[in-house]
Image (spheres, rainbow, N blue to C red):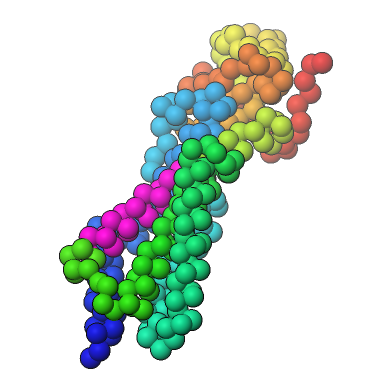
């Protein structure tokens, strides 16, 4: 066996060892569930904190966070898993092609090095606020740059078989690279989820009719205040509920509480979120018609 082939085999074995280590630490199912739960938690907590509800009050479970992230995280997760599935085969194909097409492979290595350095430079500039980028674009640029540079280094060793390090050095480098890429992936997910939460909270401010309207009936006077809220005493003294409150919007029901907003909260800088306990002294009615509120001028 030639030296280059032996180096390629060692590179493949090192890659397999790194993959085995990662597979033992994080199984694919655990990885997918953890990413979905984390994405859902960051997005949900960011959105509700922008709407005036602290995350400590929500009390959402692991399953609820996962369910809330399905529609948003499923497509990025599919893309990540497809790339993870194709990456080893593509890497092995490039290593085999490097032996028979050295000139073309050297040009490809040079192009990958330029693109990798550019990606890292853009990411570092974004971290230093020298370049205005979407928040999630900074770790994404760093991750793609690092991935290109690592692949470039592997192909460069194949094109120059005499310039290889020790197996231990190569294994440590690949393991460190894998850990760095996982951290950058977590950073990207965090930034993307936070941005999604901010966008959804902003959409609620622009279109308050997107939330279901709610009517609260209470046995006692609740003193609910806020722009658009109307208190109506009910005439029947024998009725179980004596007061009706309209002009409310439902945020969510969780942790034995109803979280509500005044219907015209987006037009009132002093508007506050309202938390009502789930109890027999309250009855809530919700409308499936999402109509814009009739706010006072």
* Most distant residue in the bottom direction: 1
* Residue at x 82%, y 16% (from the top left corner): 297
Q: Mark yes or no: residue 133 visible.
A: yes
Horizontal side of residue 174 vs 225, given as left or right: left
* Image x and y of residue 238, in percent: 61, 11
Q: Quadrant of residue 148?
A: bottom left
Front in this rendered view, residue 260 or 36: 36
Looking at the rendered structure, the number of numbered marks drawn on it comes to 0
* Residue at x 58%, y 31% (from the top left corner): 251
* Image x and y of residue 57, in percent: 43, 26
Horizontal side of residue 20 vs 137, given as left or right: left
Front in this rendered view, residue 80 or 92: 92
Q: Quadrant of residue 248?
A: top right
* Residue at x 41%, y 32% (from the top left corner): 59
Horizontal side of residue 138 vs 261, given as left or right: left
Does residue 262 sit above or below 177 in this rendering? above
Instruction: Give, as a single range, the part of the protein colored magenta.
Output: 171-190
Residue 297 lies in the magenta-colored region: no
Does residue 211 sit above or below 16 in this rendering? above
Front in this rendered view, residue 30 or 172: 172
* Image x and y of residue 271, in percent: 63, 16
* Residue at x 27%, y 73% (from the top left corner): 163
């Amino acid at each position: 066996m030639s030296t280059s082939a032996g180096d390629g085999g060692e590179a493949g074995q090192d890659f397999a060892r790194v993959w085995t280590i990662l597979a033992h630490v994080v199984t694919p199912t655990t990885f997918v569930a953890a990413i979905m739960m984390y994405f859902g938690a960051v997005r949900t907590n960011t959105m509700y904190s922008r709407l005036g509800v602290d995350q400590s009050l929500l009390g959402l479970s692991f399953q609820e966070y996962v369910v809330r992230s399905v529609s948003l995280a499923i497509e990025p997760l599919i893309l990540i898993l497809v790339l993870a599935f194709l990456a080893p085969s593509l890497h092995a194909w490039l290593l085999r092609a490097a032996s028979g097409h050295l000139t073309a492979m050297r040009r490809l290595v040079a192009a990958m090095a330029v693109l990798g350095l550019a990606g890292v430079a853009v990411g570092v500039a974004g971290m230093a606020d020298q370049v205005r980028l979407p928040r999630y674009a900074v770790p994404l640029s760093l991750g793609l740059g690092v991935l290109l540079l690592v692949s470039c280094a592997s192909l460069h060793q194949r094109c120059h078989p005499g310039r290889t390090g020790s197996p231990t050095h190569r294994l440590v480098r690949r393991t460190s690279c894998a850990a760095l890429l996982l951290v950058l992936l977590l950073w990207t997910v965090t930034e993307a989820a936070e941005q999604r939460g901010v966008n959804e909270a902003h959409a609620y401010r622009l279109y308050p009719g997107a939330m279901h309207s709610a009517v609260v009936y209470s046995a006692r006077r609740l003193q609910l205040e806020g722009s658009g809220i109307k208190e109506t005493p009910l005439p029947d003294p024998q009725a179980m509920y004596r007061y009706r409150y309209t002009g409310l919007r439902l945020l969510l029901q969780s942790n034995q509480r109803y979280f509500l907003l005044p219907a015209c909260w987006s037009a009132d800088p002093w508007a506050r979120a309202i938390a009502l306990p789930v109890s027999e002294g309250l009855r809530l009615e919700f409308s499936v018609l999402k109509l814009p509120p009739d706010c006072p001028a």
